Amino acid sequence: MLPSHTLSLTIPRNWLDLYETIWKPDYFPKWASGLSSGTLEPEGNHWKAKGPEGSIKIRFTEHNPYGVMDHWVDTGFGKEVYMPMRVIANEQGAEVIITLYRQPLMSDEKFEQDIALVKSDLDALHRLLTQ
């Protein structure tokens, strides 16, 4: 099993309304820094983007009634990285939850950097949704 770290963000918005706003793949570049080009291009069942370290492909969970926004990132090294993501109800608001898995051979420092990047991305999502 891979070590993991889960981050959560509280948004003062109905969970289903929030999910319907952010689930689409083309919404991710508005807040996810790993998509540095700012655009996603569809290619079959994947989306292509430019990440910080070069071209990436992303596969997203289809629209669903459960708030599941899982995605898989292929950086071109032959393995997709699974990113579980959910929008869940929190009374009148919502929680956005994302889990990072520490990949094999990843250093402590690199894993902490990835956690910090996702935290920053969630902060950007919060700003975007609460302005």
Image: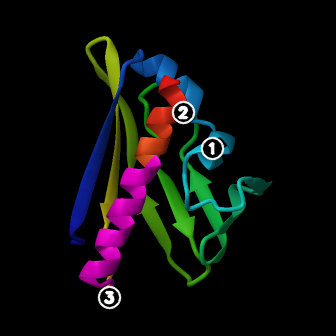
Residue shown at 58% from the left, 75% from the top:
75
Disc 1: CA contacts within 10 A as few (<14), some (14-19) or many (>=20): some
Question: Which of the two labelled residues, at mark 2 and mark 1, occupies the earlier sequence position?
Answer: 1
Q: Which residue is mark 2?
A: 128
Residue shown at 43% from the left, 38% from the top:
68
Where, by quadrant of the figure, is residue 94 drawn?
Answer: top left
Under circle 2, the secondary element is helix
Residue 64 seen in the current view: no
User: The magenta stretch spans which residues?
Assistant: 106-121
Vertical relation: 41 (above or below) 54: above
- Disc number lying in front (3 or 1): 1
CA gap, disc 3 to disc 1?
A: 30 Å
CA gap, disc 3 to disc 2?
A: 34 Å
Residue shown at 44% from the left, 34% from the top:
126
Q: Which residue is mark 1?
A: 30
Report the amino acid beneath label 3. Answer: Leu
